[in-house]
Image: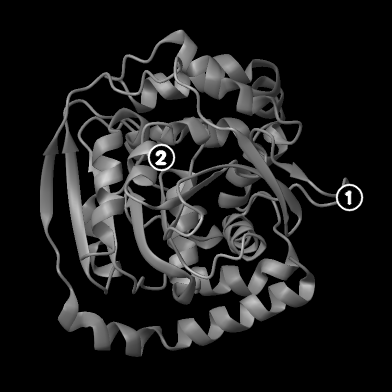
C-alpha cells in the first residue's frame, strides 16, 4: 500500500469514526445480545498428520504475504487471522468446514510469521496494531476482495476488531475471540492490579534487552511455554507444536514480536503514517458490523470479561461461551465452535 493509499485509508477512517455516534444510535434498536454455552471435549487440535495448504503468495502493501486459500473462488470471502505465538495451522480444522459450505477462505501469515516477508529491507519492522490492520486491507485489495467476513484470535482478533471499527464497509461480519481488544499506548501506560500485571509477565520481559536476546535464542521453548500457560488443559502433541513452530523462524519474527509489546507500553515508536489511525483507535470506537464474540472456559492468557465490552458492539451481536477445557487457541482447540460462529454471524 502506497503512502497515498494509506492517506486515503486514514481519511475514510476519520469519516467513519465521526459518523460512529450516529451509527450507534441508528443501530441500537437492532442489537441482539445473547450468551450461548457451547460444550466441547478438550484435546482437539491434533492436526499435525493432516496437510494444510498449499501456500500461495501475493504482494500486498509492504509485504509479500503467504497464505492458504480454500473453497470456491466465487464464494463469499472469509479471512482468518492468527495470533502470537501461533500460525495459520490454528485454522487447519476450521477451513475445511467453511470451504465445504461454499466460502472462499483466506488464511494469511501475519508479518513476521511463516513465509510472509517484507518487500524491502529498509522497511521498518513495525508491529503496531494499525499496521497489522492495514496489512489486511492491502491483502484484500491485492486479492480483489471488496468485503469479507473476518475472524481471529489473539493478535488476529485485535486486528479484525480494528478493521471492523475503521473500515466497516470492507467487513461483512466479525468473529472475535475474547471480544473487543482495541487499545492504545496511553491505556497501555496505565498500571494494572498486581495479579493482572503478573499475567503480562512476557510483555515486561520483552521490554528488556535481556528479554529480546532470550526470545531470540529460546523462541521455540518460550512459545511452547506460552501454549501451555495459555491453554492449560489442551493436550497438544509434539508434532502439532512443531508444525506451528516453523513459523517462528521467519527472519523478522523477533523484531515484530518485541516491537508489538514494546509499542503497547509506549517504549517503541510507531510509524508517522499510522498516527491518525492510532488516534482514532485511542477513542475506542464502536463496532457496527454483525459480530459474534467467543470466550473459552480455560483461557489461561489475559483476556477481558465479556461484560466489559458488550456495549462496544452496537450492531447485531451474540456472545458465546465455549466449555470443555478449551484454552486461548480456540480455533484449533474447538474448531467446530469457531467455524459455527463464522457460518452463523452473517445471518444474525
Which is more foreground, mark 1 or mark 2?
A: 2
- Horizontal side of residue 185 vs 27, given as left or right: right
Q: Quadrant of the N terminus?
A: bottom right
- Horizontal side of residue 196 vs 77, given as left or right: left
Q: 10 Å neighbourhood of mark 1: few (<14), some, or many (≥20)?
A: few
Q: Is residue 41 above or below residue 114?
A: above
Residue 78 rendering spot, x and y as whole percentages: 44, 54
* Residue carrying label 1: 122
Q: Secondary structure at mark 2?
A: helix
For the residues labelled 1 and 2, say whether their Cβ atoms are less than 8 Å apart.
Answer: no
Residue at 31% x, 52% y: name it.
342
Residue at 11% x, 43% y: name it.
37
Q: What is the spatial separation of the Cα atoms under label 1 and label 2, in whole angstroms?
A: 35 Å
Foreground of the two, 69 or 255:
69
Q: Is residue 283 visible?
A: no
Residue at 74% x, 51% y: name it.
63
Q: Is residue 183 above or below residue 16?
A: above
Foreground of the two, 282 or 54:
54
Mark 1 vs mark 2: which is more N-terminal? 2
* Residue carrying label 2: 95
Residue 123 rendering spot, x and y as whole percentages: 83, 52
Res. 286 image quadrant = bottom left
Amino acid at each position: 500500500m502506497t503512502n497515498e493509499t494509506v492517506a486515503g485509508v486514514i481519511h475514510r477512517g476519520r469519516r467513519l469514526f465521526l459518523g460512529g455516534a450516529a451509527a450507534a444510535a441508528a443501530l441500537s434498536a437492532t442489537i441482539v445480545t445473547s450468551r450461548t454455552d457451547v460444550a466441547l471435549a478438550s484435546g482437539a487440535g491434533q492436526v499435525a498428520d493432516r496437510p494444510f495448504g498449499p501456500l500461495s503468495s501475493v504482494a500486498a502493501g509492504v509485504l509479500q504475504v503467504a497464505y492458504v486459500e480454500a473453497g470456491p473462488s466465487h464464494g463469499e470471502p472469509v479471512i482468518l487471522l492468527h495470533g502470537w505465538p501461533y500460525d495459520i495451522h490454528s485454522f487447519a480444522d476450521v477451513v475445511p468446514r467453511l470451504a465445504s459450505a461454499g466460502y472462499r477462505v483466506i488464511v494469511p501469515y501475519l508479518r513476521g510469521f511463516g513465509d510472509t516477508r517484507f518487500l524491502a529491507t529498509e522497511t521498518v519492522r513495525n508491529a503496531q496494531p494499525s499496521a497489522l490492520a492495514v496489512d489486511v486491507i492491502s491483502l484484500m485489495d491485492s486479492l480483489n476482495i471488496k468485503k469479507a467476513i473476518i475472524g481471529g484470535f489473539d493478535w488476529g482478533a485485535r486486528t479484525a476488531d480494528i478493521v471492523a471499527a475503521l473500515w466497516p464497509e470492507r467487513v461483512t461480519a466479525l468473529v472475535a475471540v475474547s471480544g473487543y481488544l482495541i487499545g492504545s499506548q496511553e491505556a497501555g501506560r496505565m498500571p494494572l492490579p498486581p495479579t493482572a500485571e503478573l499475567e503480562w509477565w512476557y510483555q515486561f520481559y520483552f521490554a528488556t534487552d535481556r528479554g529480546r536476546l532470550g526470545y531470540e535464542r529460546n523462541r521455540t521453548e518460550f512459545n511452547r511455554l506460552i501454549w501451555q500457560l495459555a491453554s492449560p488443559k489442551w493436550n497438544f502433541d509434539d508434532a502439532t507444536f512443531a508444525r506451528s513452530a516453523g513459523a517462528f523462524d521467519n527472519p523478522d519474527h523477533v523484531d515484530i514480536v518485541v516491537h508489538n509489546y514494546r509499542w503497547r507500553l509506549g517504549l517503541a515508536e510507531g510509524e508517522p503514517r499510522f498516527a491518525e489511525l492510532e488516534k482514532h483507535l485511542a477513542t475506542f470506537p464502536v463496532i457496527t458490523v454483525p459480530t459474534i464474540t467467543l470466550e473459552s472456559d480455560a483461557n489461561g492468557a489475559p483476556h477481558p470479561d465479556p461484560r466489559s465490552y458488550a456495549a462496544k458492539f452496537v450492531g447485531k451481536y451474540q456472545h458465546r461461551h465455549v466449555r470443555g477445557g478449551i484454552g486461548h487457541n480456540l480455533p484449533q482447540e474447538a474448531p467446530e465452535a469457531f467455524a459455527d460462529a463464522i457460518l452463523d454471524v452473517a445471518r444474525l
